[in-house]
Amino acid sequence: MTSFGFAWRSLTRQPARALLGVTGVSVVGALLFDMLLLSGGLAVSFRDLLDGLGFDVRVTANQWVPSRGPLIGDGAGVLAKLRGLREVQDVTLLRFGQAEVVLDDDPDFSANFMGIRGRARKSWTVIEGQDLPEQDDPSIPSILVNRSLADKARLSAGDLLRLRGTCEPGAAAMPTTDFRVAGIVAFRFEAAGHHDSVTGLDAFLRACEPRDPDAATLFLVASHAEAGPAATVRAIRQALPDLHAYTNQQFVDRMQVTDFSYFRQISFALSTITLFFAFLLIATLLTVSVNQRLGEVAALRALGFRRRRIIADLLWESALFVGAGGLVALPLGGLIAGRLDAILREMPGIPAGLHFFVFQPRVVAEYTVLLAVTGVLAAAYPIYLAARLPITATLRREVVS
Amino acid sequence: MASWSVLAALLGAVLAAPPAAVDEQASNPPGILISRQLAEARGLGLGDVVRLGPQPAGERARPFRVTGVYEPVPDPFRLTAERLEIRVHLPDLIELTVAADDPGAAESVTRVNVALRDPADADRFAGDLEAKLPGVSVWPSSGSWSGADPFTVLERFHVAVASVTMIGSAAFLLSLMVMRSEERRQNAGILRLLGFTRPRILLEVFLEGLLIAAAGTAFGLLLAVAVEGLFNRFFQWHYDTALVFVHVTPGIAVKCVAIAVPLGIFAGVVASWTLLRRDIMTLLRR
């Protein structure tokens, strides 16, 4: 009989025990798999969201996330300079603000309000009506709203929307401005339950009348394919040394060490604990199992089974434990990850398209290696026990007992 | 005296020039407080003179003297932010940031903190004030969130992870107990032969399970308390904050005992029952 067959019989001889052991390994394995998914999932998902916008470089006033940092002065001048760079294919200026949605019959409510100059590329998807027109009607400018805002204000494409710009804290209350809802859209960075809207920059400025009308919150830049984002960033830094330009990857890297770091730390801590737990589980089960079969092992040795063969039997037993549990852990981990992801995505302000647990083939490889190493290490002590077993003394003890 | 917290980052080139290079236009510059993190990041100390300006390029910058270094109040919402902060007197901030052509801005404030005589009145006060001052948002500092509280979400996440861990532990425990029962199969048979009834043996198993579960739980709690400091020190070092991340409270300890002890007893009794329900001859392998 081969070592594999022998190990299989050892396990299936007591199916309840084997089933419980495999269940333990699969639950622990599922948790390990999930923590590995969490360690890089946020960054992968965030990178996908950024890349999906169709821009590969962003320019801000400082290293802060745009909505938290100061404005960029002389927006028109910066826009012109950026457009003049040969590495740059397309530039869009954005200005963020807030607005009160004024309703006749219901209480007013607050909404995110954004002004844009330039092409939006894939910043949103129109789900009803039309996109912002190239040439807008200045008397009643067009606006796009997300589904959440449209539902709350009971709006459809073509309806009138009355807004009061509240773009600067402490500023005097602005008069209302009427907009025509050109369409209902899904913003790429839209958070669940948030009310978002976007209009042309001129209409935005008219509704908000900010103190610095020429300022911008953020510039989104699309590089020429032959230049690439890294060369574009270098060119922008040279042309506009006071501003901060960074590629999507650089932005994600920075988020990894700031905003996302908590989840990376948690996933590292839990992965370590889970691995230790898996080691303890497998080592204990195998050690107890070997201790129960000392007589059997001694008899096999007496029959001529070599030490190497006993070691191979135990390694296979460990491999079967870990392999069966580890395989079950993958779909189980997927199910648990879905639930954990749903919990974390309830956090306020998280874009609907952002996920904490993202499947990557690399994670499966890491998971397999970690579990395999754990299985081998866990089998070391029971192997040592079985390999060093004194044959005669053990057989005598078995007979006497 | 009213003071404002201002992020150095927002004040652009504030600290671009080393203190020695500061233009000594003002003989007695106004005092400011800087956060410990900013002091460490820029090597600043008491008495140093720095220039603060509203623009990244340093236009309209003015000298200020560092009169104190403070530890920012730990804020979980700014956990990942570098606490590079400066506190200046309100008149200095207004003078520094308000444009000459916009005198109205000098009358504007970002936030007013209010201490109520009766803190329990906070919700009612906030509602009344919001009704009387349209355009002003008022909320109790310890009040409820309009949306999901991030810490409640995080707590739910940790509870979910703990639940999965508990299921794995339960399977582990059960398989160990089954093995232990198998080991004592003959002992159980002999006890039955000597006249011990099944309930009597189960009672012993129950008490043994109780002892093992209690000892295991106590060890687990002691381990948690022991590593609490390690976790906190690591995360406090990593995020440069005084926030406490892990705290084994009496409530958590009670919850652990309430879950772990019954689980341990249950695993022991179930594993033994599967053995004891067999007849004596089977137990003795006859």
Image (cartoon, grey):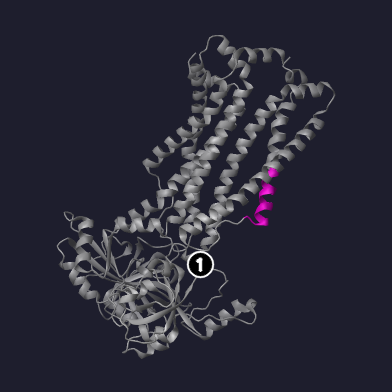
Q: To which residue does mark 1 refer?
A: B75
Region of the chain picked out in magenta, as a range: B248-262
The foreground one among A382 and A192 is A382
Q: Nearer the viewer, residue B5 or B34?
A: B34
Q: Is residue B220 above or below residue B102?
A: above
Q: Is residue A157 above or below residue B245?
A: below
Q: Secondary structure at mark 1?
A: loop
Judge from the rendering whether residue B70 lies leftward or rightward of residue A208; answer left or right: right
Q: In the figure, is residue B71 to the left or right of B166?
A: left
Does residue B228 show up magenta in the picture? Answer: no
Q: Position of residue B119 (x, y in %)?
A: 63, 77
Q: Quadrant of residue A185?
A: bottom left
Disc 1 residue type (three-letter): Asp
A324 vs A367: above or below: above
Chain letter behind tag 1: B
User: Magenta-highlighted stretch: main secondary structure?
Assistant: helix
Measured as percent of width and height from the top left, residue B44 is found at 40, 71
Please indicate whether residue B147 sits to the left or right of residue B264 in the image: left
| Residue pictured at 34% horizontal, 88% vertical | B102
Let me know if residue B116 appears in the view.
yes
Q: Number of callouts in the render?
A: 1
State the residue lying farthest toward the right. Answer: B195
Within the image, what quadrant is residue A180 found in? bottom left
Q: Is residue B254 magenta?
A: yes
Q: Position of residue A375 (x, y in %)?
A: 49, 31
